[in-house]
Image: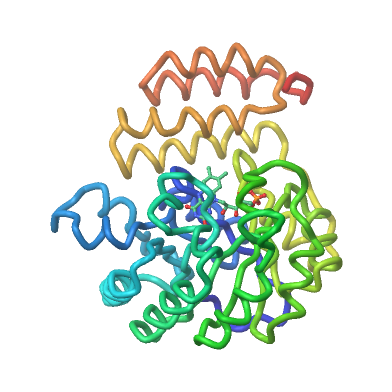
Amino acid sequence: MAPELHRPLVVLAPMAGISDRPFRVICSELGADETTTEMVSAQGFLTALKNSLAYQYLLDVAPSERHVIVQLFGHNPTWMAEACRKLTALGRFAGVDINMGCPAQKVTGSGSGSALMKDLPLAAQVIAAVRASTALPLSVKMRSGWDDECRNAPELARIAQEEGADRVIIHGRTRRQQYAGRASVEDMAAVKAAVSIPVLANGDVFSAQDALDLLRQSGCDGVMVGRGALGNPFVFEQIQAALQSKPVMLPSPQRVLRMALRHADDMVRWKGERSAMLEMRKHFSWYLKGLRGATELRRRIHQTESLDVVRSLLEERFAQEDVHEEEN
Ligand SMILES: Cc1cc2nc3c(=O)[nH]c(=O)nc-3n(C[C@H](O)[C@H](O)[C@H](O)COP(=O)(O)O)c2cc1C
């Protein structure tokens, strides 16, 4: 994890299918103090073939990346510890996070992710086993609880602290809520009040002002940003500016389009053109959000697998002076 900072930490959230090497590099260049990998299955990692391309990509870290946290999920303490030991030995991660918040049925069905919030004794065993397997800083990412009847994040946070975690992250929604409603600042404040280790607040930060409000209202030590960075990695420089009481600048449409192209370039160099251009489609949609003519541009981008074609489409757009924010 990043060296002790005397200001709130601003961290890119783990996002499956999103927080890969190219996206993390961009977010850290724009001011994320730390970034998090996509979630990694302990069991999948341990049983993957030695040269599994999927895991090579999942665990790849760029030489320029200094503060990447690897996120593990699983419910078996022995597997979690073994996976953590191997990931630590790779020598490329600055910390390890345990996923106790994922709501997806394919994860909770086996008792992992947010399902661990329904079995605190097992959650404690998982944390203790992982703690014993690594000297890296350890965090636990949780939700407010499983549902309204089981809003036990403060209790899990206390357990995490007792078992040796260095930090907790709280997404202020229950598993049942998935992404509905607003993340509860009260739940985040309750976790902060329950422990003395640092707490990161997570949920619904889409702007610098959101981050300032959340920090003030929750009393937490930092913020973790997920969806707010999609198509807008600039949110990190905006939050950093706001934290230093500097003016918050919104990027020009040209800068957004240049970033979309740079992201695509990095992705193509990393994964090859075909696979990269398929993965970039969702990112292009997010980058183009709010630009006039975005719907038509998006449609044309989705028809091609060629970076050159996308480049000409976007450059054609740079050339126009009326790239204004009108259409969503
Ligand atoms: C596409 C997507 C993938 C996600 N993948 C993960 C994951 O792998 N591990 C995890 O702990 N949370 C995952 N999350 C949850 C986020 O880390 C975060 O907790 C949640 O989106 C709330 O924060 P936000 O409002 O800033 O997006 C994912 C969220 C999204 C939108």
Q: Quadrant of residue 76?
A: bottom left
The figure's colour scheme reads: rainbow
Give above or below for 172 relative to 79: above
Q: On the picture, is 6 further left or further right than 47? A: right
Q: Quadrant of the C terminus?
A: top right
Front-most of residues 75 and 50:
75
Question: In the image shown, does 56 or 40 lie closer to the viewer?
Answer: 40
- The structure residue drawn at horizontal position 57% and vertical position 35%, both measured from the top left corner, is 258
In the image, taking residue 9 as reference, residue 47 lies left or right, namely: left
Residue 216 percent location from the top left of the image: 85, 68
Q: Residue at x 69, y 58 (%)?
A: 149
Above or below residue 320? Residue 150 is: below
Vertical comparison of 172 with 273: above or below: below
Query: Residue 273: which quarter of the image?
Result: top left
Tally of numbered discs: 0
Question: Between 282 and 80, which is closer to the camera in this rendering?
Answer: 80
Q: In the picture provided, is 90 more to the left or to the right than 51?
A: right
Q: Which residue shows up at 36% across the image and 21% down it? A: 305
Residue 6 position in % (x across, y down): 71, 82
Question: Can you give x and y, in whole percent of width and height, for residue 257 in the image?
Answer: 60, 32
Where is residue 113? Give x, y as percent: 48, 58
Looking at the image, residue 297 lies above or below residue 149: above
Residue at 70% from the left image edge and 24% from the top image edge: 291
**Residue at the left extreme, as displayed:** 50
